[in-house]
Amino acid sequence: MNSYGSFPEARPRRLRTTPAMRRMVAETRLDPADLILPAFVREGIAEPVPISAMPGVVQHTRDTLRRAAVEAVEAGISGIMLFGVPEDAKKDAAGTAGTDPDGILQVAIRDVRAEVGDELVIMSDLCLDEFTDHGHCGVLTEDGRVDNDATLERYAEMAQVQADAGVHVVAPSGMMDGQIGVIREALDTIGKEDVSILAYTAKYSSAFYGPFREAVGSSLQGDRKTYQQDPANLRESMRELALDLEEGADMVMVKPAGPYLDVLAKVAAAVDVPVAAYQISGEYAMVEAAAEKGWIDRDRAIIETLTGIRRAGAQMILTYWATEVARKLSGGV
């Protein structure tokens, strides 16, 4: 009893009293199966190359990528998203290394499929930016603009060679108008109806991509504001969502994750297909940098950020911590 009578009558703190109690009443849970590991494989290297802006992340060799895929399976995560990094000499204006059946990404898909089969969902980035000498996600017009419809032709071919290599899911990330419909038709035309499409439905022109550009050896000139979404816009994402679903997307994604949890929540509430979110390189780098300075508790911050993304509605989370977190969730080290 206090001086205000019998208040408080309600005591929510009763459900926070012990770790066991908090665990029992938790509304959101992380599971290894929620996680997808983005992985980079670089052509022409003998040892993994550390990415300076992303401590703990590397550009893999073909051999170390295979080992990373096995570790992912053992940790219980669901998928791996592959990004190919070609030799600089193989980059050109049309990104032809991206549609070469023997290009690094297609080789990596075959390697991982041979190593783990169907035990891991093998996903591939379907975009030209890693393979073009100008670093844009499509082919350019004479005056330097990204040509939407000419790029769609390249995406169709890219989808087919990735499917032939054995990928389970293609993930078009270029934000070209009509890309999902063209890719679906291209896959169906060659009898790859079972290959799924994870649409980068809301991919924002973000300041948080910086470390990723080191990871893929980007040659970007200028910016991507004419095709990636304006960070100020939400309704635009819902329009993109409606179009992607109409064109045949099997799953949809919001990228980045942390700065766009409101978008993620609205997308998740609106659809009956699986929803993914990509915790991108800048999000990863900020936590690692602050932890290295001793400013935050690294492990708690990682779990908190991932729980927030899951709570906002993501059923699948792409994160560079996927294997590490999955092991911890399973009681490993």
Image (spheres, grey):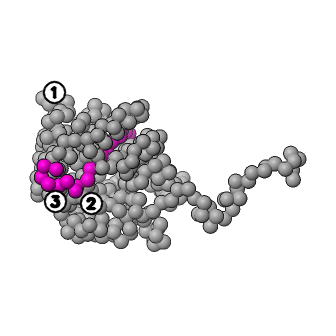
Residue mark closest to the camera, 2 vs 1: 2
- Up-down: is 95 above or below 22? above
Q: Quick one: SS at disc 1?
A: loop
Q: Which residues are magenta?
A: 188-207
Residue mark closest to the camera, 3 vs 1: 3
**Among the two numbered marks 3 and 1 on one chain, the one whose residue lies closer to the N terminus:** 1
Q: Quick one: SS at disc 3?
A: helix
Disc sitting over residue 165 in the figure: 3
Disc sitting over residue 122 in the figure: 2
Q: Residues within 10 Å of mark 2 (few under 14, many from 20)?
A: many
- Residue 53 lies, in percent from the top left, at 36, 51
- Residue 180 lies, in percent from the top left, at 24, 43
Amino acid under disc 1: Asp
Q: Residue furthest top?
A: 143
Q: Is residue 253 left or right of residue 132?
A: right
Q: Is residue 43 left or right of residue 6?
A: left
- Residue indicated by mark 1: 143
- Separation of marks 3 and 2 at Cα, in angstroms: 11 Å
Amino acid under disc 2: Ile
